[in-house]
Amino acid sequence: MIGGAAFAVPIASALAGCGGQDTASTLRVSYQQFGSGQVMRNYITEVARQFSQQRPELAVDLVPLVAAENDYFTKNDLMMSSPRTATDLVYEDTFILNSDVAAGYLRPIDDYLADWPQWRYFQPVTRDAVKAEDGKRYGVPTSTDTRAIWYHSELFRRAGLPVPWQPRTWADVLTAARTIKRRLPGVIPLNLYASKASGEKTSMQGFEMLLYGTDSTLYDQDARKWVLGSKGFLDSLGFVRTLFAEKLGPPLNSALDPNLSEQINNAWFPQGKIAMAVDGSWISSAWREGASGEWPQAAQVMRMARMPTQRGQAPGMVTLSGGWLWALPAKASRPDLAWELLKVLASTENMTDFTVADGNVTVRTDVAAQPAYRNGSPFIPFFTDLVKNTTYRPALAPYPQVSNAIQIASESVMLGGSPAAAAKAYDSTVTGIVGPDQTMREA
């Protein structure tokens, strides 16, 4: 089981090259330290203990990087830029994989993966998520998340809607929302993040859950260009416009609040003030014992439905995933030893313990089959089954700026703007970000 003492190295020391720590007998592992969270530290500490038992001549030093998300990426890149500071293993967001590969920071690991029996347990879509534009793989995924429609079954029954409920099209979702509004005055029918204040939630839990259910896409992988002028983009903005024009979403003062997610998860759902929300697999953690929105009845009340495609076209559902991976920095000097350590990090038992403790969704069939995982949360089996059909965001350097342009377009129509005008402004902004030669018009 996960537990034990940590071997911490201060970040200042890590950036300075760690002095005597970086010896031939010490492997160094860097990761993001989220606030006072202990899950990752406990996980790596236990793995370090196991590895040192197998290889008593080697020690493992933990290098926790205490930083907000964007600052973590900067620190990680700074350390990987020099052989003097590069750790032997790094924890990377799939979000920036291609950017770090393009910078020469990461080492391809296809040769290692080819001889690793457990690689066959990873869902194909997650194997592709660690493949860079050069066709090589650069990491081992840890866990992920998926997205769907959460709904309040008691409110659905009171409104005369079926439980269980599974919409087939966007029109079915709007019909349910209109029914809630008509029959349960005072209840917010549906939340779909749409403001700039909600940041990436608006892009990933909101707009892209619509766009990837159309016949259009954000980035054409074959042409390697950002798609502009698409019908799906316009239709997705149209859905957002309908939601707020018909007052089927939260009041604007709440929709513009950066703390909207806390309001929904900690208060509105437990209090029966909202019927549906498009959101991630992790939100049930707010209802656990001792959590800020502790709600013992959540398992009996809350249900999930797959987000449908626009017209019910194949594959009939949409979900998106993020996720993290372990990778080998290109400028670290002991890749073979680092790979040996990574295999212990990624053993079935260790990944099961970590995924359950962290409340995430596994990307592996062997972990998904473990009783500790299947029984860890009543909601996990549903979200795990979505992984095989998931979509990852374009892991390209311009994506954060493109995402910001999406958020601006979405908020514009939420506040009453024209979808056509918002889409036109988006096209202009993206062209300015990536350059005309990196864009294409939808055929």
Image (tube, rainbow, N blue to C red):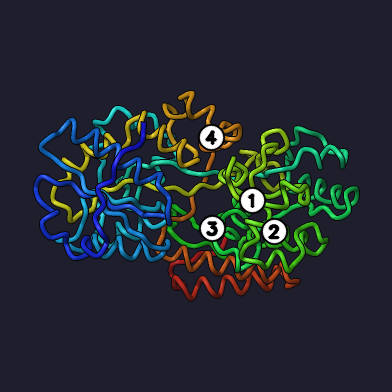
* Badge 1 or badge 4: first in the primary sequence: 1
The residue closer to the viewer here, 119 or 66, is: 66
Residue in view at x 73 percent, y 71 percent: 415
Q: Does label 4 or label 3 sit earlier along the sequence?
A: 3
User: Of residues 27 and 3, which is closer to you in this image?
Assistant: 3
Quarter of the figure that contains the N terminus: top left
Residue bearing the label numbered 4 = 384
Please say if 146 is above or below 9.
above
Name which residue type carries label 4.
Thr
Q: How far apart are marks 2 and 1 (CA)?
A: 8 Å
For mark 3, give the secondary structure.
loop
Using the image, determine if residue 394 lies above or below residue 167: below
Q: Which residue lies under the disc numbered 3? A: 218
Q: Do the residues labelled 2 and 3 touch (CB within 8 Å)?
A: no
Q: Position of residue 119 (x, y in %)?
A: 33, 32
Q: Nearer the viewer, mark 4 or mark 3?
A: 4
Q: Distance between the residues labelled 4 and 3?
A: 25 Å
Q: What element carries label 1?
A: loop
Callout 4: SS = helix
Q: Report whether 233 appears left or right of 187.
A: left
Label located before the other in sequence (2 or 1): 1
Instruction: Give the labeled residue for mark 1.
Output: 214
Residue matched to label 2: 235
Of mark 2 and mark 4, the one earlier in the sequence is 2
